[in-house]
Amino acid sequence: MSEKRGQMVRFMLNGAEVQADPNWNLLEAVRFYGIDIPTLCYNEGLTPFGSCRLCVVEIGNGDRTKLVTSCMHPVEEGLEVRTHSKRVIKTRKMILELLVARCPSSKTLQDMASRLELQEVRFKPLDDDCILCGLCVRMCEEQMVAKAIGFAGRGVDRYITTPFDMNSEECRKCGACMHICPACELRCQGPQAETVLCSGCLNTEPVCANTYDDAMCFMVPCLSCVKGPDDLK
Amino acid sequence: MKLTSIEELEDLRQQIKSGIDPNKPCIAVCGGPGCLAKHCTQIREAFEKEIVDKGLIDKVEIRTTGCHGFCEAGPIALIFPDEIFYQTLTVQDISEIVDTTIINGEVVDRLLYKDDLTGQSIINVNDIPFYKKQMQLILGNNSRIDPHSLDDYLANGGYSALTKMLGNMAPLEVLDEIKRSGLRGRGGGGFSTGRKWESTRNAKGDLKYVICNADEGDPGAFMDRSILEGNPHSVLEGMIIAAYAIGSNEGYVYVRNEYPLALKNIIIAIEQAKQYGILGPNILNSDFTFDVKVNRGGGAFICGESTALMASLEGKRGEPRAKYVHTSDKGLWDRPSNLNNVETLANVPLIINNGADWYSGIGTESSKGTKVFSLVGKIKNTGLVEVPMGRTLREIIYDIGGGIPNGKSFKAVQTGGPSGGCLPESMIDLPVDYDRLTEAGSMMGSGGMIVMDEDTCMVDLAKYFINFLEEESCGKCVPCREGLFQLGELLTDITEGRGRMEDLSLIEDLSEVLRDATLCGLGKTAPNPVMSTLKYFRDEYEAHIRDGRCPAGVCEALITYRIDPEKCNGCGLCLNKCPSDAISGDKKQPHVLYTEKCIKCDMCYEVCRFDAIGKE
Amino acid sequence: MTDSESKLCSIVDKYNAEQGSLISILQDIQAEYQFLPQEALEYVTSRLNIPGVQVYGAATFFKAFSLKPKGKRQIHVCMGTACHVRGSQRVLEELERELGIKAGDTTPDREYTLETVNCVGACALGPVVVENEEYYGQMAPIKVQGLINNK
């Protein structure tokens, strides 16, 4: 796969000179140095897709800067990379704002948005489950080698399905697609899911942890972010 | 019929030329899309019948050509050798033309073009203002040749660039010539064609592709269609030269699904070229081999984007991919691929024939050669216009286009299709070239030039473009898919009276993110129509939001229809036509329009002959 | 082989069952049947030896294809910019009203399909409506009924 063996690549990361394996993409290099970049459609074991655009970083200098998706962009000798410039932050926030508008009840998205200090969603809310990151499609194709599901439709009507939306012979019911989906499992039960991010889930410890040994959130929505412990009878 | 050397081709050319009688009348009926829509096939049939009936079969030639460019005046017939221009023909006019002009050598005055100001008749096509100020290097042969005839193309100098190249030039020389000419991509990107060829030439790999992008998707643009339909060999010749310079042996022409005639004509041209030995293995017995296949698009604007087009050629969904690795390195089937627009390729034979110095002498510092524009919308002389780069918008719109019809005033001109922007009156003297247009907030794009008058609402126009792009977005990346949808919602709110002032800054913020973070050119340039209209026509947006008013009288939710009792004479026409029973009144009495029932369909406004319906 | 099967077979053969010709193959099928029947797509999947999702994905991506049969009369309203500026939106709305369907749909009796199309290149005639390759220029809401009644 690699034509450049041995020779490490040197580039500038947030002002510091760093080295990276020439086969890496920028995301891998940046994470190696401990910098956290949010991602949705990226998974180490699957081909990068570049659709969520959350992992954007700013490259270049002076007049000639641009944003690129770090998951797709290879490391390059002499590149100047800034992972948290104003432009980058603004972009990530806007993307999450758009995504939360699309899937208001996704806990994953809400958590990510809260971490970026997004507080308001100014867009028209829709009520979808799928954020079209394509992880399930790539999982099915690359890891499970089934290619049972794929993209259909176009634009806002794009969706993921089996041919003719029917039961597929190729699908072995392995559940890998559900396992890898970042958005469909955790659902926000908050009172104002659509336009206000209360950050309740993120900032409070799950109250159920007082009563039980384990947090119950991942198995059944415990609603601790909405109700008090007295309601959990 | 296979020609096995350059000399044989040149001999054939001489043979064809000497067989042409320069005094023999030839009737060239325009077969361009506009004229086709006006039934020019019937015109052609009428001419044929007349010629047969009057026993003139061997004495007159008839051919259906490609688009002559002057769509407003169609159906057109150009009579050679004197180049007499007859316009707006009907079947009834034909026998008179044959009798008067073909047989008696005189003109039919009523069918001639009349000068706008003086009313004088103009006989020769080259004296008509619409044509006079053009420089038809690319479109010129459209009115002369039958696109189904390779012999016509040869007689008009076609494939002389090919013979010159095969005889005298090494691939690197060809490359150098194109680089020095300054030719830039005519599809929208404006990238240096020579540099693109060079990158593909230098890429690793033995199998390389030359692809012609005939997926002209900009609404309102039909330049590529007319070039491909009217002079397909010019494009083919360009491809062969490109392949030679790059070191490619396989090519594709990707034709938009909605252009069946262009598809047909390029397929015929390729067949003919193969028969003559101009395409295929060992072209004209040289050691250069090049073959071309034709593929159709499936109805997706995004497939005009290079990586999406190549995905479609691979039998996949037309979804773009990031271009951190260029298509000149890894394109179709992961092999080095050179993609050029139809008009770009049509320029190539000219450059090889006449030289880079000649070519770079035309146009401006940054933009060389001519550009074909489709001048449409609220304009008197709708059609295709070809001018050297650097002509101003004023010259194109007024001197060639004849200005705005119906006494209306110019408001804006949109260039570059859905990726471009609107320029107002204050920019009318802007010289048209790649960089000047981009600086002004628009872009050259493929060459669409839509003219608008005072009756066009700029907010509605921005909404139109966003809706178009929303429908055409592939949906892969979040900012484009979700962003365009939300932009559409915001603009719809504004046009329907629900807009808020904060919406404008949200639109601006969202637009910036689209520019920065989308995957491909569609998303990156999508904000242009919105941003340019906000820049130059912000007051219209504010009128919609603050006053709930559409100044141009377009946005249905914001206009009220009213009957002026002073002008209404109670004829009852509007009452009859109203689909929602919103008008009532007795005969000969001024009628009344009930706003609550009015659905703003505009029918009453259309039928009223007394100007009694007001829209505000 | 049934008639229908042999027709499909010849379409795929024409393009040497090449993967890259998928779009062209689908177009020929669309032209033949006025839509893409499920059986036809399944046949193409097996002949071309590509995943079913690739064929279904392509069939639902491109506007030229329809998974549902179209009407006898296919009315296309040009929504190019030039036509838009000359009032094509109103023409479309009137057609939608008269036919009782939205753009993209077919009437229940399968008589009419109403669609929008992006620029047919006849801008001098705008607003343009095309029906089965017949061009109707300078359309206006007032002319819509005449167009529909015109058989």
Image (spheres, rainbow, N blue to C red):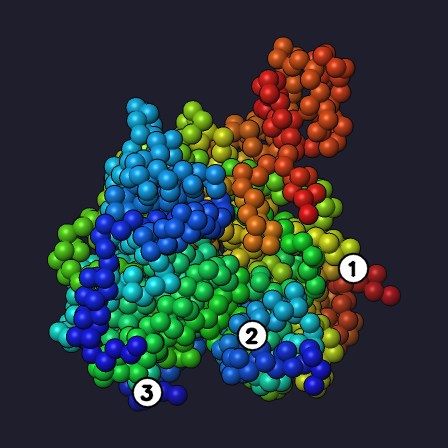
The residue shown at (66%, 13%) is B569
User: Is residue B87 positioned above or below A167 on the image?
Assistant: above
Residue A146 location (% of width, % of height): 63, 85
Chain at tag 2: C
**Between disc 1 and disc 3, whose residue precedes?**
3
Instruction: Name the residue beneath numbered marker 2.
Output: C25
Residue B426 location (% of width, % of height): 33, 32
- Tell me which corner region of the image, top left, top right, bottom left or bottom right, holds residue A128: bottom right
The image quadrant where one finds the C terminus of chain B is top right
* Horizontal arrangement in the rendering, residue B249 relative to residue C23 (left or right): left
Confirm whether circles 1 and 3 share one chain: yes
User: Is residue A182 positioned above or below C113 on the image?
Assistant: below
Instruction: Name the residue beneath numbered marker 1.
Output: A228
Residue C38 location (% of width, % of height): 69, 74
Chain at tag 1: A
* Horizontal arrangement in the rendering, residue A209 relative to residue A111 (left or right): right
Residue B206 seen in the current view: yes
Please state which amino acid type lies under the numbered disc 3: Glu
- Kindly state the secondary structure of the residue where label 3 is placed: loop
Please state which amino acid type lies under the numbered disc 2: Ile
Residue A3's label in the rendered image is 3
Q: Nearer the viewer, residue C115 or A105?
A: C115
* Horizontal arrangement in the rendering, residue B118 relative to residue B315 (left or right): left
Q: Nearer the viewer, mark 2 or mark 3?
A: 2
Please state which amino acid type lies under the numbered disc 1: Gly
